[in-house]
Image: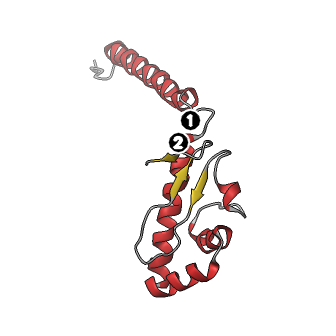
């Protein structure tokens, strides 16, 4: 008579626990995946504007790193207008639209620095032209 070590009766309880754990984890995964859709930025887009301002700051630093401080500052001063300066930053911004106004959420404006001698953050303003500290 052969002894069966792997009998089905012996492993039924652990299999049920494993199936229950898998269902529980998949349910929790669905709940956690649905959370970002419940938590939104809001109608004003303030968080998006701050994120875009930070991206422009990083693009400015990348411009200086790629071209050097003196060349990038000369190009920056020669550009003159904010839209021309934004064109200098476009290669360093992911999915950048054609104009600076299109890049920012409605009602928010960016003021780019006049020169790049001293690296400074862009100035962000809201709909009432009040500065936003970020």
Q: Residue at x 44, y 48 (%)?
A: 133
Instruction: Determine the secondary structure under disc 2.
Output: helix
Q: How far apart are marks 2 and 1 (CA)?
A: 6 Å
Q: Is residue 68 above or below residue 29?
A: below
Quarter of the rendering occupied by the N terminus: top left
19 displayed left or right of 78: left
Please identify the residue farthest to the front as the structure is shown: 129
Badge 2: few (under 14), some or many (20 or more) residues near its Cα, within 10 Å?
A: some
Q: Picture coordinates of residue 119 (x, y %)? A: 41, 70
Viewer-nearest residue: 31 or 3: 31
Question: Is the C-beta separation of discs 2 and 1 under 8 Å?
Answer: yes
At 59% from the left edge and 47% from the top edge, which residue is drawn?
129
Residue 92 is situated, as x and y percent measured from the top left of the image, at 56, 69
Q: Residue 41 carries which label?
A: 1
Secondary structure type for disc 1: loop
Question: On the image, numbered disc 2 is attached to which residue?
Answer: 47
Instruction: Check disc 1: other Cα within 10 Å, few if <14, some if 14-19, many if 20+.
Output: few
Q: Which residue is at the front of the view, 129 or 51?
A: 129
User: Which residue is located at x 50 percent, y 84 percent?
Assistant: 67
Q: In this image, 79 relative to 73: left or right? A: right
Label at residue 17: none
The coloring applied to the image is secondary structure
Image x and y of residue 63, in percent: 51, 75
Task: Note whether 127 is above or below 53 in the view shown.
Answer: above
């Amino acid at each position: 008579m052969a002894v069966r070590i792997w009998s089905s009766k012996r492993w039924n309880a652990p299999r049920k626990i494993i199936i229950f754990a898998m269902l529980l984890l998949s349910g929790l995964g669905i709940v956690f995946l649905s959370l970002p859709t419940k938590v939104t930025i809001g109608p004003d887009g303030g968080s998006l504007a701050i994120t875009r301002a930070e991206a422009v700051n990083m693009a400015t630093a990348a411009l200086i790193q790629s071209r050097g401080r003196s060349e990038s500052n000369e190009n920056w001063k020669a550009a003159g207008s904010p839209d021309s300066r934004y064109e200098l930053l476009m290669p360093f911004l992911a999915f950048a639209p054609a104009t600076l106004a299109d890049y920012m959420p409605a009602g928010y404006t960016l003021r780019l620095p006049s020169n790049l001698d001293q690296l400074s953050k862009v100035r962000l303003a809201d709909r009432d032209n009040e500065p936003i500290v970020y």
